[in-house]
């Protein structure tokens, strides 16, 4: 695996990897501190493309002023070993100044799907995500890119942006969403789970459990507001300090729903336990 951290070496490495013609390049964007969720994305990419590129970049633009940009885990040596073991061809690990040279002044904002949920709780977050993902696509020019469904709203934002800006190459499957990889007790894997104390980690399993219970009740026809209120109560009882949101949405458009519809729905939750903000989502059948 080659590791590159500046744009010119990236372009040269990609040009060589693309030989001979017809070689497909898959990109897996990450912020590092890799776990099985990320490695599942890498394996999906490996199965579909001749060349797999992974980016690791802790993107300052998507962190709010009071968020965990400085504390975010950075373990590049460990990540490099994990990616080598997966047969990744290229690690794109730009510095902040390579990504955002002095004078950088552009923001990409995706209306609609960026609003509410994490976009409401983290103002500007999805502008930062959309901007860096557009740059990553332009830098690597992948034939396909892989994102986790753990960040369901992020996936919707990126799909919208890539479609609106014609960012990906034609005639290939563009953006792949990969189902959430979970721990044995149901907690969605996340780099931020490392922030949890042992006690918080044990309590955190209440999140997927309460979501499972709420979605089952909604599927059985119980009123949505009551199911969501009980979900919030269950999280408080389990020791969660606050619930940023617990909402039922149209799975594709992310339009808010206060009652069941005859189309795919998604239950999405963000809640805080100790200093850690956890997000999760699951399908609600119709
Ligand atoms: N448990 C998971 N299952 C599937 N995909 C995942 C999982 N966790 C992260 N991903 C995906 O990996 C990609 C990189 O995510 P990122 O590096 O932010 O990791 P993360 O674990 O989600 O970290 P964070 O704690 O910042 O949310 C994203 O597309 C994300 O959706
Ligand atoms: C897509 C992403 C790599 C953009 O920084 C990030 O938001 C993430 O890791 O999910
Ligand atoms: N996985 C989404 C990146 C973030 O929380 O900033």
Image (cartoon, rainbow, N blue to C red):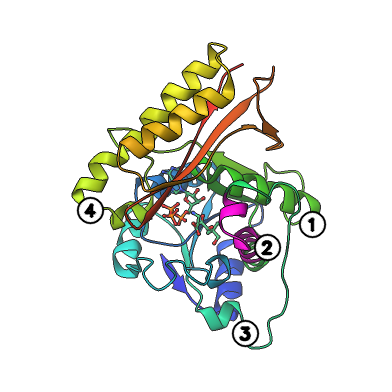
**What separation in Å lies between label 1 and label 2 (alpha carbons)?**
9 Å
Residue nearest the viewer, comparing 266 with 160: 266
Count of numbered badges drawn on the protein: 4
Asked if labels 2 and 1 touch by Cβ distance under 8 angstroms, the answer is: yes
* Mark 1, other Cα within 10 Å: few <14 / some 14–19 / many ≥20: few
The quarter of the displayed image where residue 286 is located? top right
Label 3 CB-ligand 2 distance < 8 A: no
Q: Secondary structure at mark 4?
A: loop
**What separation in Å lies between label 4 and label 2 (alpha carbons)?**
35 Å
Asked if labels 1 and 3 touch by Cβ distance under 8 angstroms, the answer is: no
User: N-terminal of the two: label 4 or label 2?
Assistant: 2
Check residue 165 in the rendering and tell me which mark sits there, or answer none: 1
Check residue 201 in the rendering and tell me which mark sits there, or answer none: none
| Residue farthest toward the left in the current orientation of the protein | 198
Is the residue 246 above or below the residue 39 in the image? above
Residue 149 in the image, given as x and y percentages of width and height: 52, 40
Q: Quadrant of the N terminus?
A: bottom left
**What separation in Å lies between label 3 and label 2 (alpha carbons)?**
16 Å
Q: Which residues are magenta?
A: 118-134
* Residue that carries the numbered disc 4 in the rendered image: 197
Is the residue 234 above or below the residue 56 in the image? above
User: N-terminal of the two: label 3 or label 1?
Assistant: 3
Check residue 134 in the rendering and tell me which mark sits there, or answer none: 2
* Residue that carries the numbered disc 3 in the rendered image: 101
Most common SS among magenta residues: helix
Residue drawn at point x = 66 percent, y = 65 percent: 131
User: N-terminal of the two: label 1 or label 2?
Assistant: 2
The quarter of the displayed image where residue 235 is located? top left
Residue 139 in the image, given as x and y percentages of width and height: 64, 68
């Amino acid at each position: 695996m080659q590791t590159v951290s500046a744009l010119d070496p990236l372009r040269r490495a990609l040009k060589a990897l693309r030989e001979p013609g017809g070689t497909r390049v898959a990109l897996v964007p990450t912020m590092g501190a890799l776990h099985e969720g990320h490695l599942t994305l890498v394996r999906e990419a490996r199965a579909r493309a001749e060349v797999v590129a992974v980016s690791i970049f802790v993107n300052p633009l998507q962190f709010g002023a009071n968020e965990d940009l400085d504390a975010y885990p950075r373990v590049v040596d460990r990540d490099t070993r994990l990616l080598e073991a997966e047969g990744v061809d290229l690690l794109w690990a730009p510095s902040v100044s390579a990504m955002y040279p002095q004078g950088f002044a552009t923001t990409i904002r995706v209306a609609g799907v960026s609003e509410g949920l994490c976009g409401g709780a983290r103002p500007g977050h999805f502008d930062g995500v959309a901007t860096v993902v557009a740059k990553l696509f332009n830098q690597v020019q992948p034939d396909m890119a892989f994102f986790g469904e753990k960040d369901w709203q992020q996936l919707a934002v990126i799909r919208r942006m890539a479609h609106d800006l014609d960012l990906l190459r034609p005639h290939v499957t563009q953006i792949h969403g990969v189902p959430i990889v979970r721990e044995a007790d149901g907690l969605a894997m996340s780099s931020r789970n490392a922030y949890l104390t042992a006690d918080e980690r044990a309590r955190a399993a209440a999140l997927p459990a309460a979501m499972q219970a709420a979605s089952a009740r909604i599927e059985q026809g119980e009123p949505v507001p009551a199911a969501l209120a009980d979900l919030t109560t269950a999280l408080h009882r389990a020791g969660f300090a606050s619930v940023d949101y617990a909402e039922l949405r149209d799975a594709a458009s992310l339009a808010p729903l206060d009652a069941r519809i005859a189309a795919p729905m998604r239950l999405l939750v963000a809640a805080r336990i100790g200093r850690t903000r956890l997000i999760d989502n699951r399908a609600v059948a119709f």
